[in-house]
Amino acid sequence: MTDFTDKLRPADPQGPDILAQERSGSNVNNDQLAKHLLSRNGFLDRQKKILSVLEPIPIFCKKNQLNMARPDRYHLSLARSKMLRRLSLKHNWAIEDYQIAEYLMDEMSPYALQTVMFMTSLREQCNDEQKAYWLTKAENWEIIGCYGQTELGHGSNVKGIECEARWDPKTKEFIIHSPTITASKWWNGALGRTANHAIVVAQLLLPDGNTGKYKSYGPHQWVVQIRDMKTNKPLQGIVIGDIGPKYGYPGMDNGYMLFEHFRVPHSALLSKYSGVNSDTGAYIRPENPAVVYGSMTYVRAQIIMHARLILARAVTVAVRYLSIRRQFADRDAKGPGAPEQAVLNYPTVQVRILPLLATTFALHYTGEAMYKLYYGTRQAIEQSGDFSRLAEMHAASSGLKSLCTTLAADGIETCRRAMGGHGFGGGSGMIALNNEYLSKPTVEGDNWMITQQTAAYLIKRMTEVVKNHDLKPSDSVDVQLQAFIQSQQKQQNFSLDDDFALVQAFRHRASYLTYQVYEARIVQKLPWTDLMLHLHRLSRAYSESLLVSNFYNAIFEAKLDPPVDSATVDVLKNLYRLFAIFTLDISASEFLLSKALHADQLQDLTPRVLKLMKAIRPHAVRLVDAWSVPDYVLESALGSYDGDVYNRLFHKAHRENPLNLQTFNPDWKSEEIVMGEGEETARRRLEALALGVTGHEQMKSPRSKL
Amino acid sequence: MTDFTDKLRPADPQGPDILAQERSGSNVNNDQLAKHLLSRNGFLDRQKKILSVLEPIPIFCKKNQLNMARPDRYHLSLARSKMLRRLSLKHNWAIEDYQIAEYLMDEMSPYALQTVMFMTSLREQCNDEQKAYWLTKAENWEIIGCYGQTELGHGSNVKGIECEARWDPKTKEFIIHSPTITASKWWNGALGRTANHAIVVAQLLLPDGNTGKYKSYGPHQWVVQIRDMKTNKPLQGIVIGDIGPKYGYPGMDNGYMLFEHFRVPHSALLSKYSGVNSDTGAYIRPENPAVVYGSMTYVRAQIIMHARLILARAVTVAVRYLSIRRQFADRDAKGPGAPEQAVLNYPTVQVRILPLLATTFALHYTGEAMYKLYYGTRQAIEQSGDFSRLAEMHAASSGLKSLCTTLAADGIETCRRAMGGHGFGGGSGMIALNNEYLSKPTVEGDNWMITQQTAAYLIKRMTEVVKNHDLKPSDSVDVQLQAFIQSQQKQQNFSLDDDFALVQAFRHRASYLTYQVYEARIVQKLPWTDLMLHLHRLSRAYSESLLVSNFYNAIFEAKLDPPVDSATVDVLKNLYRLFAIFTLDISASEFLLSKALHADQLQDLTPRVLKLMKAIRPHAVRLVDAWSVPDYVLESALGSYDGDVYNRLFHKAHRENPLNLQTFNPDWKSEEIVMGEGEETARRRLEALALGVTGHEQMKSPRSKL
């Protein structure tokens, strides 16, 4: 296919020239910075190694994904999953390599649950005998597993699930049963079409003495074969299916599952911590249920580290494209010949992108701090049985999960909108990124719900601090709260020029909100529900103080490791300041009411933000380069490393769009659609398309009631 | 397909029972309110009439849409377009009926440009001769048209477009040419595969005397046949195609187009206002270019009225589902048997949904006010040549377009997130709604750019007001600014208990920000670009004052027409208060700095919001009922009128998901995907799927550079 467009090129200046200039105009050492940010577990080297394996393989090509029907997306994703598994054996990948392959593939696949939820549950919940049998099978991938907890009617409140497992003392079996439609398992990844085994979470029901009645002992886990190993059809007594299209994850078969008095043996109940005595039918109680908290913090640290890379991806696309895109001459420029400005030069664009660039670093240093906290706490528990830091760690991880995933989810869309029209197109690479990340504010603890846990901890500490003036502080929260009590609510007026005073301002405001809520709940005894808004705000304030203080500690207090040179550190310092002052500005009235700042200082926030953005602007391209997101992951004509935006956009449309292979009949008088197919063929084809699998009978269902 | 799930039903309480209780527990007269909100142009009656025509037609069934490949979505959309056109003739639909059919179909179709951009341009820009020829053809749909303005490299800055039309004095023709890739027309709806004619916007180039050079007279419009009327293939010298998948609008063929020295006759230049003398090649200048402003206000009033219905749709789904969904017992409830609460009872959920419910009404009354302003201004111009209100109207419409579409776009996503897991699923009906509406903050004037126009007008008026103390106010802006100047920046402390004082507080804050910007720009002469952030904030503040004052005027000052009973009006009053105080709270520090409020009042904002939400909560279901969004438009298992949430979600997955018709081979050692297809077949099929139209050669393009 050749035509006159082959000899055309974009109007000057050319994108690659612009990015070359941007890069040469900054003294940020982005290679050094990349090593500083991405050396954990050899990330950078592994990324390079795995990328070279994946990119040449045809089924790993991403360019046609947005054109496909949803069933085809699952087919492709299953094929890729299998290929990844084979590659990991062939190349002897470590688990970290495999994880990076999944990151690069950038698709939630039907095998994604196997190592995460399925094996982890088996490892953590099986007794030794069960582990020897099941974990071995899972680790050899002889069985494909999923994790069935969430139900159609029950998400966050796990205690409310309806699926039940009733002990039959006669046969020594559990009878798993779904009494209602809402008891249907729902959302469970890999369940819909793939997995042949599942961890099933159900209410454990045991006979209540000899009353003939049953008593619930709450949700427990069973490992259950759900499909035939040869045909892959559901076993008799189980109904399973894929729940259908979602916002994102077209390649994942999130499923539903119901049981009809389905029997499993006594050994199916995962029994490391608790169990049922098969002789007496008596319940065996767990000893210390608190141990799960630790690993939840680890998962949340991972979520934050993931959030920073996801946000870095969006910011990378935005910074590169907006450096290249020109629009309007400066309004104060003289004469009609003034050149159009790079869009990133406008403060209204900078204010949307550059604070998010700063946020990627804020998330990074807090993720690092959480890993450190996790390993420190685990060591304290294992070496000296010291559980004292667990509560603070859990409280911090809840609030931070909520705040960081919200920042990333909102940030992606902010970047996209800043890119105007092309941000809305498929060439942006933002569609799947945005749609899929929108799940994160909900999963692993809803962002509006888990903040209660953070607030509850802070209220508890404030109660102790107020009660006991000589309290020996048990953690950093106590220290802050004591400082606040000692300040006697005097006007503080922390200086905006002092980098550490910014940390103090955030701490003071969080402590003030803690005190307010403590007053309302503990002193005035107001209903918890009525305080929920305040609790949420408190959690946000506290989490922001952690982001700011972790950022400060990493840049100003600790030695950067691996090191970066001083010119680069200077830019990091400005990023810290921008993050802190921009964040402060959003909730300015809270800083005012807490007396951390006085009203005149508020007037000074926007000028400072503008000044910091001007200082950071020349380094923006190198800063996003440091995040080292490969073109294969960006999958973006706007954000590619080389900056050849318009050629890529055009050729993607002109050469790779299947719709352009067909010619259509635009005449409304004819029912023909594809030119030459004829009216009758078109009519039948289109009706079948619209009605899908169930045909016209479904149309007879009740119409809209107005 | 029958199985044991057929006899199951959801756990109690049943959704339909819950919604029945919600409806019986409120005295809002939603039928009356529906008539009050939706009687313009007989909307409600027309909606009922058209719905009964569309719903039984198979190709108008929406249930399979999320499963389809993108090319199929275009096929279906073209078929629907044609059907709508035939139906409109068969049933003798008025243009309003046709528009409602498009609203109900809820799909941007390849015919959507015909009546809007194509015919409107012909009507407004053709001279009489051209009109007789072209408009007749378009109105009879003998030709299918599109509108080609935006280019790959040029969006908002229309003056910067590169496509050129050079006058050839010898042949008396224009030579249309695309000199670069960035000159490619881009995004133009219906261009990609459908339209055979286009309005082409290009730089008019005329010979500059006898210098041999050409001079540009800026962008003008030509009507051009672009495809063969029989084959529908592009004419020689034109390259056209569809730009590929986007966030939304899969059924629309947004296109690209380049010309290679393509000749069109003199008569192709649309010449109502300006033109070229075909004898001398001289430019004929337009007389009054300001006339377009008026119709832009009309389009923006339509955008706001559209935004209110779109937001009402999201809020309808959220309110109904969140009334039904149960989660957790009240934390202060005694005993283990406490029932789970409706999610909408939690303040953390209310605060996300109920202010948006109030926003739908705020948008409505401002849309109505803009229509009134538009018709009043047009009458003043036509009857007495009075153009004086044009500038204010244009300034208001720019700021309001920006604010209202941002509120709606953000509001949809806020509703979606509040619905947790099910909000992320296809049964929510939110996917297309959200993805498509995200275009609105960008199109018809980018939301961050057009606010400059609003701010510029306010600066101009403030300059006049400051200069001339005895100025006779020319519009309501002058009145406000004068009041502010007269207040001498004294502390105001408007009472939060006084409904009109809320309006005054918003006006005072907007005037304060106007004065700040006036000072910076006019007195201190700061660069425009450095002020852009302030200009944007000013526009937002001014637009919020319009939303609040229009809401106030409609509920407290004017007689509601058609009338609603007093119990309903009382709820509307609370919605007004909630909208005003919630909006105020978001920018609290601006109200403080402007001295509209003092610091102690800020402490009182959240308790007031909580109290108002409690008062509105019992009426939420009836209030969304009043917006009368049919189930056919909602296409949502979560939001259907009857509340049968869980049965709908389950049956949609269990009966209508094509993926569930196939069985898969989950074994990683086999390349087979669909059970029984064999490894070789699967391998070839999947490679072709991944690589799309261009095959493996494209994979040889440069790899990711790290």
Image: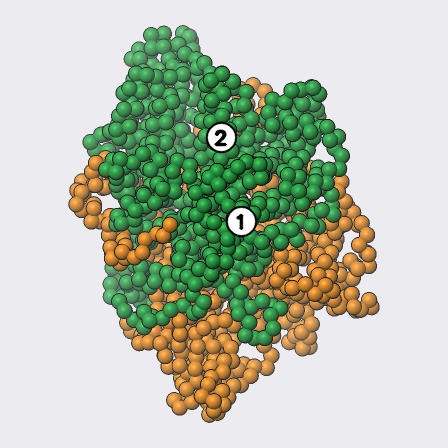
Chain colours: A green, B orange
Whether residue B667 sits left or right of residue B578 in the image: it is left
Q: CA distance from mark 1 to mark 2?
A: 27 Å
- Give the mark nearer the N terminus: 1 vs 2: 2
Whether residue A533 sits left or right of residue B60 in the image: it is right
Q: Position of residue B79 (x, y in %)?
A: 34, 60
* B381 w.r.t. A394: above or below: below
Q: Amino acid at mark 2?
A: Lys
Q: Position of residue B269 (x, y in %)?
A: 46, 81
Rendered image quadrant of residue B536: bottom right
Residue that lies at the very extreme toward the front in this rendered image: A565
Residue pointed to by mark 1: A567
SS at mark 2?
A: helix
Q: Residue at x 37, y 63 (%)?
A: A647
Q: Residues within 10 Å of mark 1 (few under 14, many from 20)?
A: few
Residue B609 visible in image = no
Q: Residue at x 64, y 39 (%)?
A: A500
Q: Residue at x 36, y 7 (%)?
A: A280
- Using the image as rendered, state which of residue B599 and residue A495 is in the foreground: A495
Q: Residue at x 31, y 18 (%)?
A: A130
Q: Residues within 10 Å of mark 2 (few under 14, many from 20)?
A: some
Q: Amino acid at mark 1?
A: Ala
Numbered circle sitting on residue B296: none
Whether residue A193 sits left or right of residue B543 in the image: it is left
Q: Chain of mark 1?
A: A
Labelled pair 1, 2 in contact (Cβ < 8 Å) = no
Residue pointed to by mark 2: A372
Q: Chain of mark 2?
A: A
The mark closer to the camera, 1 or 2, is 1
Q: Quadrant of the N terminus of chain B?
A: top left
Rendered image quadrant of residue B348: top right
Whether residue A242 sits left or right of residue A29 in the image: it is left
- Using the image as rendered, state which of residue B251 and residue A408 is in the foreground: A408
